[in-house]
Image (cartoon, rainbow, N blue to C red):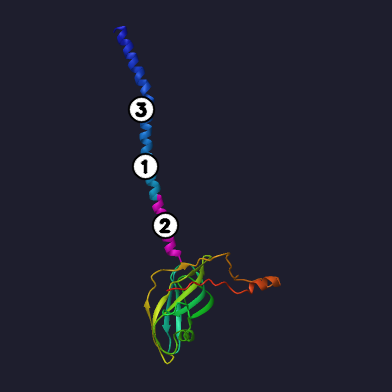
């Protein structure tokens, strides 16, 4: 083998060795792209899983109340509130109105707890008759405001068809379910909330502050 052939062979080997880092870089970039795409797919799958888990959690624990007006006798009717969710709530305000009026006719303040899956009922025949009058036939609606998980919610208007003659309830049947579930009531300004437990040894100034009328947080509308 001649000297020229040996020199050319050495040059080709050195050239090949110099290309090895370039080839390694290309292979590394190729596998990096594959790993990046796999990571993105994993992240997307994880996000979808978390979204489904959050949706399932909210579906199970978001408060949901059902209101029904039931006829007891010719002069008495009962409001039945069923807690369809797992979380417990604190009933605060029951509103009654005729759909022809934009403003609720009757407002009854409450402070009754309602455990998830349980039912609360109370007779409101006189208030319902006061809302409808002695002679009325048409829709009447009821809405409930309540506390749950540190926030205040309000249900949509549950409608019922009522027939009243000479101050006697002849018929009272549910007519339509609300199109939407409960809504969070947004408050403007600093939040003020009544204390469930009061300190009997509190100062007179604190009692004076506690005796102030509540803020009006009710939002009306069909």
Q: CA distance from mark 2 to mark 3?
A: 45 Å
Q: Is residue 165 visible?
A: yes
- Secondary element under disc 3, as helix, strand or loop, is helix
Q: Is residue 141 above or below residue 37?
A: below
Q: Is residue 70 above or below residue 25?
A: below
Residue at left offset 37%, top offset 21%:
18
- Secondary element under disc 2, as helix, strand or loop, is helix
The quadrant the C terminus occupies is: bottom left
Mark 2: few/some/many CA within 10 Å (<14, 14-19, 20+): few
Q: Which residue is mark 3?
A: 23
Q: Is residue 63 visible?
A: no
Q: Is residue 33 above or below residue 176?
A: above
Q: Which residue is mark 2?
A: 53
Q: Which region shows up in magenta? A: 46-63
Which numbered mark, 2 or 3, is in the foreground of this view? Answer: 3
Q: Which residue is mark 1?
A: 37
């Amino acid at each position: 083998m001649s000297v020229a052939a040996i020199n050319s062979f050495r040059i080709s080997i050195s050239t090949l060795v110099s290309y090895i880092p370039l080839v390694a870089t290309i292979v590394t970039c190729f596998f990096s792209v594959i790993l990046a795409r796999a990571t993105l797919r994993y992240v997307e799958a994880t996000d979808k899983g978390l979204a489904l888990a959050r949706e399932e959690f909210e579906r199970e624990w978001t408060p949901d109340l059902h209101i029904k007006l039931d006829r007891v006798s010719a002069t008495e009717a009962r409001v039945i509130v069923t807690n369809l969710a797992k979380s417990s709530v604190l009933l605060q305000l029951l509103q009654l109105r005729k759909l022809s009026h934009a403003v609720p006719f009757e407002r009854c303040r409450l402070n009754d707890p309602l455990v998830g899956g349980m039912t609360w009922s109370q007779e409101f025949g006189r208030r319902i008759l006061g809302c409808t009058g002695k002679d009325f036939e048409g829709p009447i609606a009821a809405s409930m405001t309540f506390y749950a998980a540190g926030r205040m919610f309000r249900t949509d208007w549950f409608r019922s068809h009522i027939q009243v003659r000479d101050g006697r309830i002849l018929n009272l049947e549910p007519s339509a379910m609300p199109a939407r579930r409960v809504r969070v009531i947004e408050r403007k300004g600093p939040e003020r909330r009544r204390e469930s437990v009061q300190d009997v040894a509190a100062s007179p100034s604190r009692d004076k502050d506690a005796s102030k009328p509540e803020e009006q947080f009710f939002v009306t509308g069909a």
